[in-house]
Image (spheres, rainbow, N blue to C red):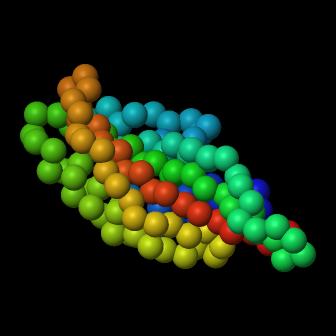
Amino acid sequence: MSIGFIHSALDKHLKEIDPLPPTAWENAKFNQPTNGAMYLKISFLPASSDFGSLGVNGTTHERGIYQVGISAPGGSGSGLAEDMADKIIDHFKLKTLGTVRTTLPTRSQAMPDEGRIWLAVSIPYFVEQFF
């Protein structure tokens, strides 16, 4: 299984959130909203692979983090960003997306940044492959 397949499955699942704020996908052109609206920024963080088992029916494991950064207007508290974080966490919690499985997402502390507030939702993923 390629890392691209895993990344694509997670992106596709995120796109099912309705309504989805404007999203800065990795390696795609993105113009930050000029009206100060909320937007998301995707970071795909693969970790190292390992062997689950060896032998005739051996397996490998692919693990990593699919991280969704949430940027919301500053000055009005963190509620808007936290509501979106809750929505993302509920959407990804303990899902099976084909061969990609997610575990329990976590959120970071909200941090101010140049008139905005940022927080990140980290979604651990796991794929077991037979070789």
Residue 86 seen in the current view: yes
Q: Which quadrant holds residue 73?
A: top left
Quarter of the image where the C terminus is located: bottom right
Residue in the image at 67% along x and 47% along y: 48
Q: Position of residue 9 (x, y in %)?
A: 61, 64
Q: Please state, as top left, top right, bottom left or bottom right, where the N terminus lies in the image.
A: bottom right
Q: Is residue 20 above or below residue 81?
A: below
Instruction: Measuring from the top left, give residue 37's x and y in whole percent.
Output: 27, 42
Task: Return the residue found at the far top.
Answer: 114
Q: Is residue 81 left or right of residue 123?
A: left
Where in the figure is residue 7, as x and y percent of width and height?
62, 55
| Residue placed most toward the observer, 18 or 11 | 11
Q: Is residue 14 above or below residue 75?
A: below
Q: Farthest residue in the right direction?
A: 56
Quadrant location of residue 50?
bottom right
- Across and down, in percent, residue 94 comes to 44, 73
Is residue 15 something that shows in the picture?
no
Q: Does 120 appear above or below 62?
A: above
Which residue is pictured at 90% across the width and 75% down the height? 56
Residue in view at x 26 percent, y 26 percent: 113
Counting the numbered discs, the total is: 0
Give the camera-side residue of 3 and 38: 3
Outermost residue to the left: 76
Q: Residue at x 56, y 70 (%)?
A: 101
Left or right: where 12 falls relative to 113: right
Q: Quadrant of residue 38?
A: top left
